[in-house]
Amino acid sequence: MKILVCISKTPDTTSKIAFKNGNTQFDDAGVQWIINPYDEWFALVRAIELKEKDPSTIIHLVTVGAADCDPIIRKALALGGDEAFRINADSNDSYYIAAQIAEIAKQNQYDLIFTGKEAIDYNSAALGGMIAELVDLPYISLATLFELNGTTATITREIEGGEEIAEVALPLVVSCQKGISEQRIPNMRGIMAARTKPLKVVEPAAIDNLTSIVNFELPAPKAGCKMVTADNVPELIRLLHEEAKAF
Amino acid sequence: MSVLIVLDQSDNHIKKSAYEILSYGSKLAAQIGTTAEALVLGTVQDDLKSLGKYGVTKVHQVNNETLNHVDGKLYAKTIAEVVSQTNATVVVFSQTHTGKSVASRVAARLKAGLVAGAASLPDTSNGFVVRKTVFSGKAFANISIQSPIKVISLNPNSVSTVLTEGTAEVNQLNIVIENSKIKIIAVNKITGEIPLTEADIVVSGGRGLKGPENWGVLLDLAKVLGAGTACSRPVGDAHWRPHHEHVGQTGVQVAPNLYIALGISGAIQHLAGVNRSKIMVVINKDPEAPFFKAADYGIVGDLFDIVPQMTAEIKKLKGIA
């Protein structure tokens, strides 16, 4: 079985967000880069678990990004994964990224393509759906449980107000979230092995960016918290009802 | 040229998210000098012509049982067909569970630029630029869509709904739908609870409640407000509350009108799940709790003392015994 895991580089969850160059670029001064948590803890770990169950499984990792993505790719290889592809392009357009990955997918006939639920920097949650459409596969998003029985997957996924359990034949695309697996720490053996695992840099296919970022904005600063004393709870309720009209 | 608005449905009814995108799509259509039409997939039984009061001139329906469950591939194919039939140049979704997975497929199929997580109407004064939330709600990005067809998925609770006097023409479409390759074995709805992503008010508890046995004060407040209940990550991890209540960066993202946080310190990862709330109220005994910096209203004190008083006061206000 062959699994493709899509990973991306994002700022660490505690990063202070700032912009530079007239608010046209993210200011990465002092930012710690990590693998997007949904990609690492859920998409990648679940794939590794499937490989542990069936050692003949091959796991490929793919990222669309510049050379500064290599450290997080090595970290992902340290957790697990046999080989990585980095498509040497920088883009914020979901279609561009999905179409580049779809090119890799078309060349490799994967049984499963895993992504994280969304990237914590751009929050579009679009990658999995776009890849699925471009390679004409079923797509199950927001999977909280994934079981494989031969070539049929049984997947529990989150829907509004509950969950749905579905059976789908491979091949398919799945976006993964909490519940599907637990975060892991790479061990020394994994880190050593990652150094010699193949990381292939691929030039991008000729694909259009359909969107582009004009600029960024920070939210207007909050007016400040209106504090009410603990002995005056009715005042809080009055403010919420009359001033904030919150209920 | 028209705006096509794709409405979420479940159990034969249109979902709450639909009303907001109907208004959004209609306003957008007026802005670019065209009309807005809606699309409903599945055996929805609601009065579709009354949706005209949100500003749409037509509501199309593909009344096919196979579409009652969301099979993204079938949805994308059907929606693309309707886009072609209606000459739609903008397709609007709600950035809900369904919207996220379907909008992306539709955009890829039509080779249409997608802005997922839009926060407001586009700026069409010079091109087509849509503002969306980024960095888990810590900032906004203005995104230009360059393709002829544009897909927008709107964050719920971003724009107000506006009612007019109109009615819509209802059009039943005859589109052949293949069988789904996704076999649904079970659907488990959480009954007796308001889904967090749809709740107008959310009451959330953290470690300050000290244990699952103490959740009564929170539940009483939630009940009197008709609120959904949520919790912080440590509470979810400790199994004090069910997983689906965990709000935060790696949990549920909510955008209610009112978010009340009890005994939650307000770590950045928690805020990333709640920062689109219109009003945030924090009750915490630690005056240094970072949450107070992000909140609109706050009380420093013992929540076990304060929250029952809040509940009693709200009951008084609502005339409940």
Image: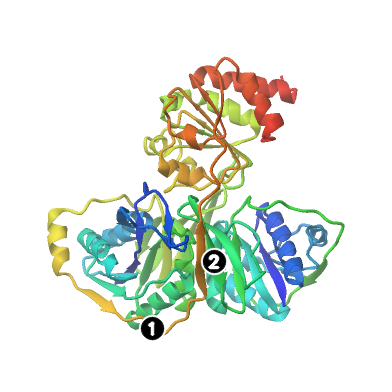
Residue B147: which quarter of the image?
bottom right
Give the alpha-carbon distance from disc 2 to disc 1, as whole Å: 23 Å
Q: In the image shown, does A197 or A73 lie closer to the viewer?
A: A73
Q: Farthest right residue?
A: B165
Q: In the image shown, does B321 or A163 lie closer to the viewer?
A: B321
For label 2, count other residues whose C-alpha is less than 10 Å away and answer few (under 14), some (14-19) or many (20+).
many
Residue B42: which quarter of the image?
bottom right
Under mark 2, the amino acid is Ile
B95 relative to A187 in the view: left or right: right
Above or below for B239 versus B33:
above
Under mark 1, the amino acid is Ala
Of all chains, the one bearing label 2 is: B
Circle 2 residue: B143
Residue at the location (48% across, 45% down)?
B273
Above or below for A91 versus A49:
below
- In the rendered image, residue A60, in percent from the top left (x then y), is placed at 28, 71
Circle 1 residue: A205
Of all chains, the one bearing label 1 is: A
Could you tell me if the residues under marks 2 and 1 are in contact, i.e. CB atoms within 8 Å?
no
- In the rendered image, residue A95, in percent from the top left (x then y), is placed at 48, 73
Q: In the image shown, does B123 or B262 lie closer to the viewer?
A: B123
- In the rendered image, residue B216, in percent from the top left (x then y), is placed at 53, 24
Question: Which color mode does the image show?
Answer: rainbow
Residue at the location (32% across, 76% down)?
A88
Q: Are marks 2 and 1 on the same chain?
A: no
B118 relative to B235 in the view: left or right: right
Q: Could you say whether the residue bearing mark 2 is in a helix, strand or loop?
A: strand
Residue at the location (69% across, 32% down)?
A243
